[in-house]
């Protein structure tokens, strides 16, 4: 593992993510919403730090709720590589990925 990635994992307190990579939840809204499907009530918004290190990939998965990925430091700064994201569906022009898309990411 690249030393910068290892340092970020330690400094940010990241844990292994079930779909690959590392994460830590940094915000959970106190407001609750009821999705219009078979899911239970949930927080209106959560925010996480997420890191994939060079050579890793997140498993192919379906995100059922809208997601707005953000980019912090990545690529060469975190591991010397480039990342790519594959989505089955089309994100809108504002960077929002509507719920129901399948996707995965690799570095």
Image (cartoon, rainbow, N blue to C red):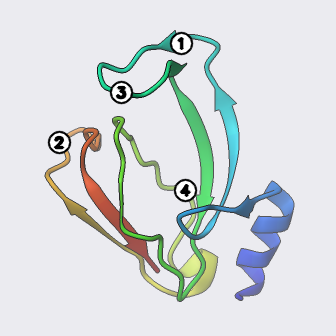
Q: Upstream in the sequence, badge 1 or badge 3? A: 1
Tell me the SS state at disc 1: strand
- For label 2, the residue is 93
Q: CA distance from mark 2 to mark 3?
A: 29 Å
Q: Which disc, if any, is residue 38?
A: 3
Displayed quadrant of residue 7: bottom right
The N terminus sits in image quarter: bottom right
Between residue 1 and residue 73, name the one nearer to us.
1
- For label 1, the residue is 32
Query: Disc 2 vs disc 1: Cβ atoms closer than 8 Å?
Result: no
Query: Disc 4 vs disc 1: Cβ atoms closer than 8 Å?
Result: no
Q: Is residue 83 left or right of residue 6?
A: left
Q: Can you name the residue that lies furthest to the front here? A: 38
Task: Classify 10 Å Cα crowding around label 2: few (below 14), some (14-19), many (20 and above).
Answer: few
Q: Position of residue 105 (x, y in %)?
A: 40, 70
Q: Which disc, if any, is residue 72?
A: 4
Q: Position of residue 26 (x, y in %)?
A: 70, 38
User: In the displayed structure, would residue 103 be above or below residue 6?
Assistant: above
Q: Which mark is in front, 2 or 1? A: 1
Q: CA distance from mark 1 to mark 3?
A: 15 Å
The residue positioned 36% from the left and 68% from the top of the image is: 60
Q: CA distance from mark 3 to mark 4?
A: 33 Å
Tell me the SS state at disc 3: loop
């Amino acid at each position: 593992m690249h030393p910068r990635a290892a340092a970020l994992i330690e400094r940010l307190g990241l844990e292994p993510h079930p779909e690959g990579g590392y994460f830590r939840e940094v915000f959970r809204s106190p407001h609750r919403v009821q999705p219009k499907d078979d899911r239970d009530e949930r927080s209106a918004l959560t925010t996480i730090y997420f890191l994939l290190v060079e050579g890793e990939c997140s498993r192919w998965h379906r995100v059922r709720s809208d997601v707005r990925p953000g980019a912090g430091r990545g690529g060469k700064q975190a591991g010397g590589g480039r990342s790519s994201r594959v989505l089955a569906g089309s994100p809108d022009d504002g960077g929002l990925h509507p719920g129901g898309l399948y996707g995965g990411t690799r570095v």
